[in-house]
Amino acid sequence: MISNNYNNNVNFTARLDLKNVAKNKRMWNEVAQMFEAKTSKTPYTFHIDDSNRVIDIYATNSTRLDDIEHSCTLSKEGTKKFMALTPEKKVNKLAKLLNIFKRYDKTTNTGLECLEKLEKQDKFDTLTISERGDISFFDRILWAVTDKAQADRVIETSKDPIFRCADFLD
């Protein structure tokens, strides 16, 4: 049985976890306060790490298990451009990234819900078992959903000077 453990509880606020930030702590604290105010009722936590001369952003959804769901590593050039922004513009970039992650999650959750419905009607177990040793229908559908979510993200970030060269992992 598929379990997507998604809860629409809105008693959370998106927040920045800055325990792995080594530089510019005062600026990051200011950004964190503004980010949390701007993204209230959004259950994500961004873990920021600036230890490798680039900015790594790990995002978890607070309504799920504490697994890292998304990762965005800015390129050196993207990090430089990001750090040159005002705190307000940094918040806007982080909010944009949050929206990208939310759309990705919505797409994948929709796919999982569809698969869950198909699984309930799978009288002959054809969804998860392949007769010829090929990839199962379940995997093909799930991969297509993941490919779609990634393609949407690529299109959304392709013109952004900070995110277009970033490495994303989901």
Image: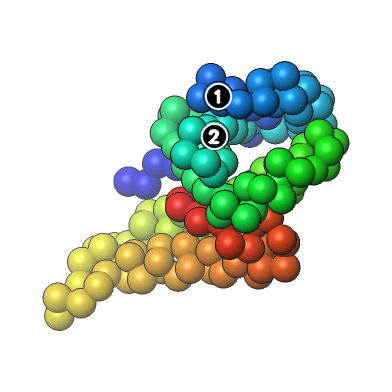
Give whichever of discs 2 and 1 has the lower sequence position.
Answer: 1
149 vs 158, nearest the viewer? 158
Q: Which residue is mark 1?
A: 22
- The answer to which quarter of the image holds residue 104 is bottom right
The secondary structure type at the circle numbered 2 is loop
The circle drawn on residue 50 is 2
- Give, as a three-letter code, the residue at label 2: Asp
Residue 40 placement (x, y as % from top left): 77, 27
Q: CA distance from mark 2 to mark 1?
A: 6 Å
| Whether label 2 touches label 1, CB < 8 Å | yes
**Looking at the image, residue 9 lies above or below residue 92:** above
Three-letter code, disc 1: Ala
Residue drawn at x 72%, y 68% is: 159
Question: x%, y% of residue 109?
Answer: 53, 51
Among the 4 quarters of the image, the one containing residue 3: top left
Secondary structure of the residue carrying tag 1 is: loop
Q: Is residue 88 above or below residue 31?
A: below
Residue at figure coordinates x 14%, y 75% from the top left: 133
